[in-house]
Image: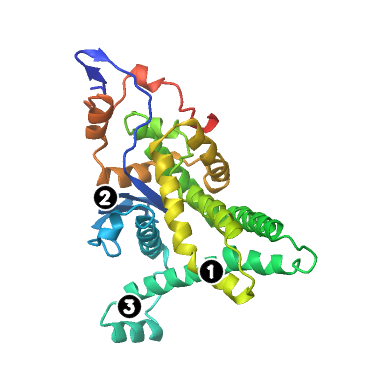
Amino acid sequence: MSCCVLVKGKTMAKRTGHYSGIGGQAVLEGVMMKNGEKYAVAVRKPDGGIEVELENYQGVAHTSVFRKIPFVRGIFNFADSLILGTKCLNYSAGFYEEEDAKETAADKALNKVSGGNGEKILTVLVTIFSVVLAVGIFILLPYFITSFFREYIRSEALMAIIEGVLRIAIFLLYVIAIASMKDIKRLYMYHGAEHKCINCVERGKPLTVRNVMRSSRLHKRCGTSFLFFVMFVSIVLFFFIRVQNPALRVLLRILLIPVVAGISYELIRLAGRSNSLPVRILSAPGMLIQRLTTKEPTKDMVEVAIASVEAVFDWKKYLKDEFAYVVDSPVLNEEEETAPADTQEKE
């Protein structure tokens, strides 16, 4: 039994990247993958087995016409990613909670008040808190630090540039600081496994552990790149929007967050669909930061990521439709086993 790529009896070896539409995120000892309204969370359990949960998530205001409008749809997609991401992280953490952990009085009270929806409410509250904390650290903190220089620097343009540089510096320091934590390092390894799976199929390769391990751990549609675009777009917007009242300056920065998210989403969406030189240049800083937020995974981590992909995505049909690959079996022949590794990281 072997896997072969056939088109009219001839072996093909296309390597051009195609957009697959799947995306995901790393969770505690696992990976979440989403395709359309379907998402799956695969987790390596303490006993070594892989648990896969498959569900639907329609998203915030999924029937709204605004979800199809450019620069507006990004706001809804950003909210969805936060809500679903928090939910999946909580689900994966449940496998590693202490067995003797009991429901607290606060848990009982919340479930009673919410009619048994305590977990959903807690997810929303955690998401809101995360957004508020992020706004405080990455939007407001750079502004307040920069304000100390206001009496020495009269140029508003220079002040805006200093604020932007501080914003990026704080973001990079945050990424570097958490990357040194042991648990976060494993999360980043699963992050790498997630990217490698997507790169594997989008480069026209059968989704096997060997092919995934040889694929790039960097991807232009990564959330890390999205966050860099948020920083970049905020610098540009805040540079051109100037008011004298300090309170109004703070308020405008907060009110413009949905605008920043909407523009950043369109940029990351473009990056995932184009490989032109301008797009590659625009994506380069985010790809560079991904070297901090992704690590090379182990084979058992890749197995978890593959299980998550296969729960929501028919990669064999995708390879047939996009690359004219016909996969007869999951076992690769000798030629494909020795195929050159993906070189995307070097681009």
Q: Is residue 184 above or below residue 126?
A: above
Circle nearer the viewer, 3 or 2: 2
Quarter of the image with the N terminus in it: top left
Q: Please name the amino acid that badge 1 sits on.
A: Leu
Give the image location of residue 180, x and y in percent: 62, 53
**Most foreground residue, 327 or 235:** 235
Q: Please name the amino acid that badge 2 sits on.
A: Gly
Q: Which residue is mark 3?
A: 118
Q: Where residue 252 is drawn, which disc sits there?
A: 1
Element type at mark 1: helix
Q: Residue at x 54, y 50 (%)?
A: 228
Q: Residue furthest right?
A: 152
Residue 25 shows in this picture = yes
Q: Residue at x 30, y 17 (%)?
A: 12
**Circles 1 and 2: CB distance less than 8 Å?**
no
Please rate how many residues cluster around mark 2, counting C-alpha atoms within 10 Å: few if below 14, some from 14 to 19, many from 20: few
Q: Residue at x 25, y 59 (%)?
A: 65
Q: Earlier in the sequence, mark 3 or mark 2?
A: 2
Give the image location of residue 174, x and y in percent: 61, 58
